[in-house]
Amino acid sequence: MIRSRTLAVVPLFLVVLVAACSSSGSSPSAASQAPASVAPASVTPASQAPASQAPASAATGSATVEAKPVGSNGTVLVAANGMTVYTFTKDTKDSGKSACTGGCATTWPPLTVAAGATPTGGTGVTGTLATITRDDGTLQVTYNGLPLYFFMNDKNPGDSNGVYTNWEAVKP
């Protein structure tokens, strides 16, 4: 009898654990998503950089972000790898902080540059690019004072699967 109760409690415990580890509920469950498969040479989501490698950097002479048409979203910002970048409406402009940490940053990896690198804008970028220092020490790229992120379920350049409640593709 005890064994039957234990087997019934374990799945319930796992559901509670997964719910507690998820973000504020504004994004899809990270447990059902695979990580993005595109890892560019010049700009990489921080969560995909190998542990022995510094966070992503902008290649010499290459723009960190540029404006391109992306499906029904019109012209939006994309990273050097062609992947759409997003802003989180819970971030506060010019605060120097990201509100997306922990599990949120797994689903929405920050766009980063290497220490000492300066993000650059390519064709169509009219706003101001800068960086903030995340709690883990990486430099996250900002656009007009808001941190930029990738979405882990965008698999190919031009995908824009990350438009959700509290998440927006970035207009130039």
Image: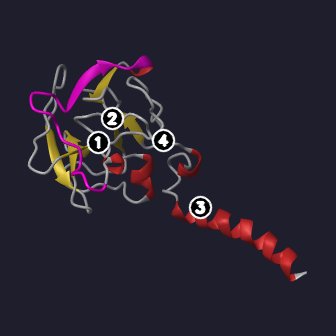
Residue kind at label 3, given as amino acid type = Ala
Return the residue nearer the eye: 90 or 105. 105
Q: Disc 2 versus disc 4: distance between alpha carbons?
A: 15 Å
Number of residues whose C-alpha sits closer than 10 Å to that of mark 4, classed few (under 14), some (14–19) or many (20 or more): few
The percent position of residue 41, horizontal first and vertical second, equals 25, 34
In primary-sequence order, the first of circles 4 and 3 is: 3
Q: Disc 2 versus disc 3: distance between alpha carbons?
A: 26 Å
Return the residue nearer the eye: 147 or 55. 55
Q: Look at the image and name its color scheme.
A: secondary structure
Left/right placement of residue 111 relative to residue 150 reads: left
Q: Disc 4 versus disc 3: distance between alpha carbons?
A: 18 Å
Segment colored magenta: 51-71
Q: Nearer the viewer, mark 4 or mark 1?
A: 1
In primary-sequence order, the first of circles 2 and 3 is: 3
Residue at image point 37% right, 54% down: 100
Q: Disc 4 versus disc 1: distance between alpha carbons?
A: 16 Å
Residue pointed to by mark 2: 85
In primary-sequence order, the first of circles 2 and 4 is: 2
The percent position of residue 66, horizontal first and vertical second, equals 22, 25
> Above or below — where is 109 with respect to 163?
below
Q: Disc 2 versus disc 1: distance between alpha carbons?
A: 6 Å
Number of residues whose C-alpha sits closer than 10 Å to that of mark 1, classed few (under 14), some (14–19) or many (20 or more): many
Q: Secondary structure beneath disc 1?
A: loop
Left/right placement of residue 75 relative to residue 72 reads: left
Is the C-beta separation of discs 2 and 1 under 8 Å? Answer: yes
